[in-house]
Amino acid sequence: MKKNFVGVMVILFFAFVMFSACGGDKGPATLAIKAAEEAINVAKTEVGKIAPDEIASLEGALTSAKDKLAKGEIKEALAEAQGLVGKAKDVVAAAKAKKDELTKQWTDMSQGLPEMVGALESRLGILSQAKKLPANLTAEKLAEAKSGLAAVKEDWTKAQEIFKSGNMADAIATATTIKEKVVKAMESLGMTVPTGAKS
Amino acid sequence: MADEKWDAKQYYEVKKGDTLWKIAEAHYGDGNLYKKIFEANKDILKNPDTIQTGQKLHIP
């Protein structure tokens, strides 16, 4: 009976020592995870719409660090969480550079596209009055350009709405598709395409 | 227009022997539409029958 009691006490002692040891490491790991979570939240707020994949990757790594902590893999959880703060900052910096580039692209297109559409519309209006079309232009091509113009105007309104919602990448993708359609229409009418629209 | 690379205005440089009629015919297929070019270039053209070689005309 006495032997059993001592055994139980020894087990309890070791359990206490191990629990204390784990508890000591868990503190820094918990703090590191909290810091990483805050850094990721800041990154998500600032650049979540520009770099959604990168933010998802950071969130995945954070979940992994939390899982490790829950499993008692404290050192690994700490190391992973500590690395995430820096990674979140890198994502924000890269996304801001990307945002600047997208802003320039959008500014160029939002100035250039309406001018291109205006030039196309003007030419289509005049060609519609012509009794005979230029040698390189068929009535089918003219009709195609006219119907394309209506679609382009509609799409341009959509692109502007997407931009206003803050989704720059999608707005630029839509604007790029519009630009390609306008370029095609201008070329079919024998018009000169602005150099900025060729890239 | 802030950026000339995006300037979509259409231009044509007048060559020897050109007339507004010929230019309209080349661009629109119909010489009768020469007035459209004349109207768009009234700042530099006083008379549709008088154009100068080297003049840069806007073709609307």
Image (tube, grey):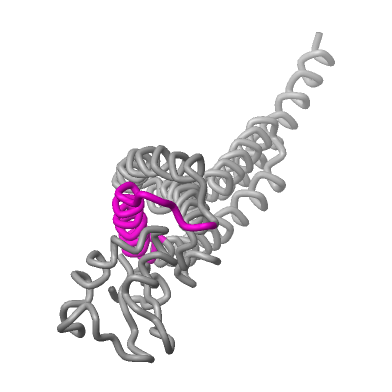
Return the x and y of residue A129 as percentages of the image width and height: 30, 49
Residue A158 in the image, given as x and y percentages of width and height: 34, 40
Q: Which residue is depicted at the point 34% across and 84% down? A: B56
In this orientation, does residue B60 appear?
A: yes
Could you tell whether B43 is left or right of A16 in the image?
left
User: Which SS type dominates the magenta stretch?
Assistant: helix
The one nearer the camera, A6 or A60, is: A60
Q: Which residues are magenta?
A: A106-135
Residue depicted at x 36% and y 55%: A120
Q: Does the magenta portion include A134?
A: yes
Residue A154 % position (x, y): 33, 38
* Left or right of residue B10: residue A2: right
Q: Can the viewer see residue A35?
A: no
The residue that appears at 75% across and 32% down in the rendered structure is: A14
Give the image quarter of residue A106.
Answer: bottom left
Which residue is nearer to you in this view: A18 or A173? A173
- Comparing A80 with A60, the one in front is A60
Q: Residue furthest right?
A: A3
